[in-house]
Image (spheres, rainbow, N blue to C red):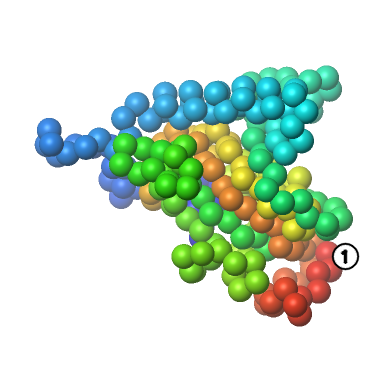
Amino acid sequence: MRRILRPELLLTGLLALLALASCKENDEEVEEYPDWQKKNEQYFTNKYNMVKQQIASGNTSWKIIKAYGKPADVDGFTGSATDYILVKVLEEGTGSGCPLFTDTVRCHYRGQLIASTTHVDSSDPELGIAFDRSWNTDTYSPATSTPSKLAVSSLVDGFSTALQHMHIGDHWLVYMPHQLGYGSLVHNDIPAYSTLVFDMSLAAYYHPGKAVPDWQTPESFVWDAE
């Protein structure tokens, strides 16, 4: 559950490079990630353009959010498409306020790559291998799963940006270009130049100096971010 940490906080080296499955030992072995950079960049560009069209047509279930630290948009979307994350709102929460960069959160999440040669998600053919998740069971249940404790400032830019716009109870599917993920770095099961897709739900957040309690079931948990 540490794979969404910022790239500069990760140790990279030979073992990480060997995790990349694109090298072939013989002609019969299937290459898992052919033209991966090109494929991911084209995928995100197409997704970005689709979401812009959806928003223009009045679809309110999609959002385009500029990464924190980038110049704010004044009139329309400015800058490169890779300055943004794309959000599909699956469920709207009722909490007030959003986490700050300096806050700590409790968050449920699952991270996936886009579909590769041999890994295709049967529930969404656009997606592939799930490289990380916060819940220990096969099926996520907000009633029984324990959300991970994460420092917003320690996460990759795309994940951190999403959290800073979420309210308690929000459930989002978030698409992050590799520029807001690990970029040209290889990390564990994540090849370089990978678009990251996160199913994420914000359960709670805490300001600096506020103790983060052990997680309780929804029935007994009382949230307080003051």
Can residue 132 be seen from the camera position used here? yes
Residue 217 horizontal side relative to residue 31, left or right: right
Q: What is the x, y in percent for residue 86?
A: 64, 35
Task: Give the quadrant of the C terminus.
Answer: bottom right
Q: Is residue 71 above or below residue 204?
A: above
Q: Is residue 208 above or below residue 9?
A: below
- Which residue sits at x=55%, y=23%? 45
Q: Which residue is mark 1?
A: 226
Q: Quadrant of residue 119?
A: top left
Q: What is the x, y in percent for residue 91?
A: 72, 51
What type is the residue that disc 1 sits on?
Answer: Glu
Q: What is the x, y in percent for residue 19?
A: 31, 47
Q: Secondary structure at mark 1?
A: loop
- Which residue sits at x=17%, y=39%? 29
Query: Could you say which is closer to the camera, residue 206 or residue 131?
Result: 131
Q: Quadrant of residue 142?
A: bottom right
